[in-house]
Amino acid sequence: QVQLVESGGGLVQPGGSLRLSCAASGFPFSDYAMSWYRQAPGQERELVAGISSAASDTNYADSVKGRFTISRDNGKNTVYLQMNRLKPEDTAVYYCNAARRTRYYWGQGTQVTVSS
């Protein structure tokens, strides 16, 4: 059974940091590109950051470049999103995504709220 379980979300003040984790199981993790998406209320889901299967390539939304870092540990079947200098506009549900060719999986999401 495929599972993507996100954790690490919560309430943080502007300027603070959070580290999201996504633990994967049920599929060959090291064969899949991994990404983090987010969805704010009333808005479409958007790509935040992605990392290739071997971690050789990463990409980021312009809005998070220089503040967020995506990484993965293929030995632990886990992908991370380090979020620094958080802003209120980063408030959203953050989702983990695994993709390989036409196959993809989603996690259930974790809430991140940036507020004073």
Image (spheres, grey):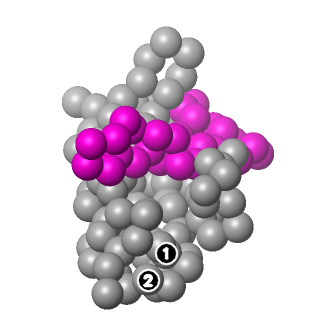
Q: Taking 70 as reference, is 104 above or below it?
A: above
Q: Taking 68 as reference, is 26 above or below it?
A: above
| Quadrant hosting residue 112 | bottom left
Element under disc 1: loop
- Residue pictured at 30% horizontal, 70% vertical: 113
Per the image, the residue denoted by label 2 is 14
Question: Seen in the image, is 86 located left or right of residue 94?
Answer: right
Q: Which mark is residue 86?
A: 1
- Residue pictured at 50% horizontal, 60% vertical: 80
Residue 49 among those drawn in magenta: yes
Residue 62 among those drawn in magenta: no
Of the numbered discs 1 and 2, the one sitting upstream in the chain is 2
The answer to whether marks 1 and 2 mark residues whose Cβ atoms lie closer than 8 Å is yes
* Distance from the alpha carbon under mark 1 to that under mark 2: 5 Å
Question: Seen in the image, is 29 located left or right of residue 60?
Answer: left
Q: Position of residue 14 (x, y in %)?
A: 44, 83
**Magenta region: which residues?**
30-58
Decide which of 54, 104 is in the foreground and name it: 104
Do we see residue 55 in this rendering? no
Q: Taking 35 as reference, is 62 above or below it?
A: below
